[in-house]
Each structure stands twice: as C-alpha cells, then as structure tokens.
Image (cartoon, helix red, strand yellow):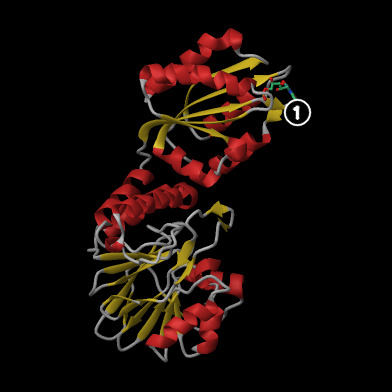
Amino acid sequence: MKIADNVYWVGVVDWNVRDFHGYSTMYGTSYNAYLIKDEKVVLIDTVKFGFEEDLLGKIEEITDRIDYVVVNHVEMDHAGALKAVLEKYPEAKIVTNARGKRGLKEAYGIERDVEVVKTGDRLKIGKQELMFIETPMVHWPDSMATYLIEQKILFPNDAFGMHYASSKLIDVELSEEDLEKVFFEAAKYYANIVLPYSQQVRKVLDELKKIELKMICPSHGIIWKDNIEKIVKKYDEWSSGKADRKIVIAYDSMWGYTEKALKKIVEGIEEVGVPYRIYKLRNSDFTELMAEVMQSKGLIVGSSTLNREIFPSVAAFLTYMKGLKPFDKVAAAFGSYGWSGEAVDKIVQVFKELNFEVVGAVKFRFSSDEKSEELKELGRKLAEKL
Ligand SMILES: Cc1cc2nc3c(=O)[nH]c(=O)nc-3n(C[C@H](O)[C@H](O)[C@H](O)COP(=O)(O)O)c2cc1C
C-alpha cells in the first residue's frame, strides 16, 4: 500500500488481539513496517513473529531485493520477523544503533555485520537520504527514529503510536468519530507504555523541533498526516504532566462498607462541580484506567484491609500505576477496616513515593456512618484543589 512517493506500508493488521503483553487492546492493533524504494531498497522495521508470511508477501509484490533493514526497535512486535526477512534476503544489511545491535544478539541470536548509527548519522539510499535520531528509553534503550529527509517523513517506531486496528491507514481517511477514538488510544498508549519516560520524551520533542514533519509513521496504528501538530502537542502535554480538572476514583470493597463511603466523597465532589469517574477495580480494565489517571489531575483510591494488606485488586492496580510513574497528582485515600486497618496508610505511602500531593486520608472501623462529614469534606477539599 503506497503512502508516499515510493514509500509503502508493508505491515499487518492484528484485528483480534485483545491482550497484548497484558495491555488490553479493545480495537486490536497493527504492526507497521515500511518499505522505501530508491536506488537502494530499505525496509523499516518488521512485524510480530507469527506474521512473517504476511510481511514477506507484501514485500514480494513491491521488490525482489532488500538492501537495508532499519531496526528502530528490537522488541518482538517489530523485530520478531527479522530472522525470516534475513533468510529470504540474506544480502540485506541491518542498520541500527549500538544498543539495537546488542539487543538483536541477546533477543534473537542475530550476530552479523551491522551498520551502527547514532543521532545525526545519515545514509544515502539513492536520490534520498535517511537520518537517524536515537530516542533512548522511548520506550526501550534501543529505541530510535528514522527520518526520510527529502519527503520529511518520520518513522519513530512506538512513539506517537496507538493500538488501533483499521482498514484505513492515514488519519485523513478517518471520520471525526474514529479520529477521537484514535486520540484516546494514543493517550492510552502513552499512559501505559511511554509515561515513565516522559523526561526522555521531552528531549525527543526538542530534537523534532529541528526538523520539518509532513508525515509521522508509527509502528502501531494510524499514520499522522493532518494531525501532526495536534499529536505532537498532546505528547508535549502528557510528558509535562498537564491533566484535566477531573477526578478518578478507584476502589474495591468486600462487604460494601468502602463502597458506601464512596457516596459521601462523591457528594463533596459534586458540591464543587468537578467531573469524576468511578472504577471498581475488580471489574476494571487497568489499561483504560491508566489513560484516565494520566489525563485527570485528581485521584482517590479506596480499599478495605484484608489480612493487614491492601485489598488485592487495589494493590495490583497501585503496583501497576507506580511503575508507570504518573506525576503532579492531587490524591486522597479512604477505606474500611475491622481491627488493624493498614490499607489506607499503605495507599498513602504509594502516593508519597510518587510525590503526589495528599489532601487527606479517612479510614473507619466497618461502617463509615460516623465519618460521613469527614468523607464529604475529603471529596470537597480534593475537588477544590484542582
Ligand atoms: C478475610 C478477611 C480478612 C480481614 N483482615 C483484616 C485485617 O487484617 N485487618 C483489619 O483491620 N481488617 C480486616 N478485615 C476486616 C475488613 O477490613 C472489614 O470487614 C471491612 O469493614 C471491610 O470493608 P469492605 O466492606 O469495604 O470490604 C478482614 C476481613 C476479611 C473478610
């Protein structure tokens, strides 16, 4: 499928994947690989293992040789089909950075002559030239972007991508409604994959200011053409911790005491008039929830105490969230207990580790009836802070 002058999409759409290494992909995904035909033929990335035949079939329709395979990222969904490509096109030379070279050896046992590049290096492929921009830790050490200078097309691998299977490839082809879904999926992708590396993202955004962009071709989902400015602005916002005046309330409860207390907190929030979303963690999709957490300034977490611990679904979410390092949040905790009541203190501990501003924590023995006013005040106070 041609996407620009002698540039082809040769990726695959994985319509039915719903669990992608634990990340829930409600719309499936795609593994985008690209082929540039100049005097030299360049393949940019491959696809996930298991889809080798699809990739090779598409390449075959366009070319009978490959001169270079650029490996922007060694992860299995992009380099998983590399061995199959090299078997079919043994003369192809790998182009990657030093960490990529090591990753190929460690992950796939691929040890061969590699053209090692670093930021600013160029590779002449005929009339056109490629330039490489290392993007370490966005989101793996080896991550890199490739820029087709003459056509101003950036292939940034996972950056700016989203898990979204579609029969359309480019944003210009999408309806407003689908575009909205794509932006939410891009936010979800950022929140669940890129967020811990926001400092590095800011460095990449600075690098990108030096070049002009006509197309951004990520390794998952939709290609950006008409919305480049908007997605770059979103990355700027997400990486700088900008969030909406909204509250996420995430909780779990065994006998309903913590759940009942939630209603009082909500009354307080409603008095101030801040929008909120409630998630009972046992039934919640953590991937989606993280997108909401990233985009909301306020976070309230509730848990009863079970065996001196946070209730498992709440603990699991906190562990997941902590690893993703959300920042600049205003937070509160609450929960019921029977005798020792450790859960709320442990939630606050997590908030502190993340440097959240904690506006309060309310815990109560079994029923929260005697703490109704305190709970309402907790909701009010948090909402007023936003
Ligand atoms: C299996 C089990 C273990 C519990 N362990 C503790 C505990 O270690 N410390 C404590 O304070 N409460 C403990 N509790 C009591 C609950 O925290 C208490 O019933 C609380 O009100 C439940 O709130 P919920 O209905 O919101 O889940 C335990 C309850 C159960 C069912």
Residue depicted at x 59% and y 36%? 281
**Is residue 320 visible in this depiction of the protein?**
yes
Residue 310 percent coordinates (x, y): 66, 30
Q: Is residue 291 above or below residue 15?
A: above
Residue drawn at point x = 37 percent, y = 62 percent? 222
Q: Quadrant of residue 207?
A: bottom left
Question: Looking at the rendering, in which quadrant would you find the C terminus?
Answer: top left
Q: Does 63 appear above or below 8?
A: below
In percent of width and height, residue 208 lies at: 29, 59
Q: Nearer the viewer, residue 367 or 324?
A: 367
Instruction: Locate ligand 1 by image quadrant.
Output: top right
Q: Indicate whether 351 appears above or below 368.
A: below
161 sits to left or right of 316: left
Q: Is residue 144 above or below residue 335?
A: below
Location of residue 315 in the rendering, given as x and y in whole percent from the top left corner: 63, 36
Judge by depth and name the residue closer to the eye, 18 or 315. Answer: 18
Q: Quadrant of the N terminus?
A: bottom left
> For residue 128, what is the image quadrant?
bottom left
- Mark 1: C-beta under 8 Å from nearest atom of ligand 1: yes
Q: Which residue is mark 1?
A: 307
Which residue lies at the image location 28% right of the left edge and 86% below the top edge? 126
Q: Nearer the viewer, residue 2 or 136?
A: 2
Residue 177 spot, x, y in % from top left: 33, 51
Which residue does the image show at 60% across and 74% down from the upper left? 108
Q: How many marks?
A: 1
Please name the amino acid that badge 1 sits on: Asn
Q: In this image, 87 relative to 139: left or right?
A: right
Mark 1 nearby-residue class (10 Å; few <14, some 14–19, many ≥20): few
Q: Secondary structure at mark 1?
A: loop
Say whether residue 325 is visible.
no
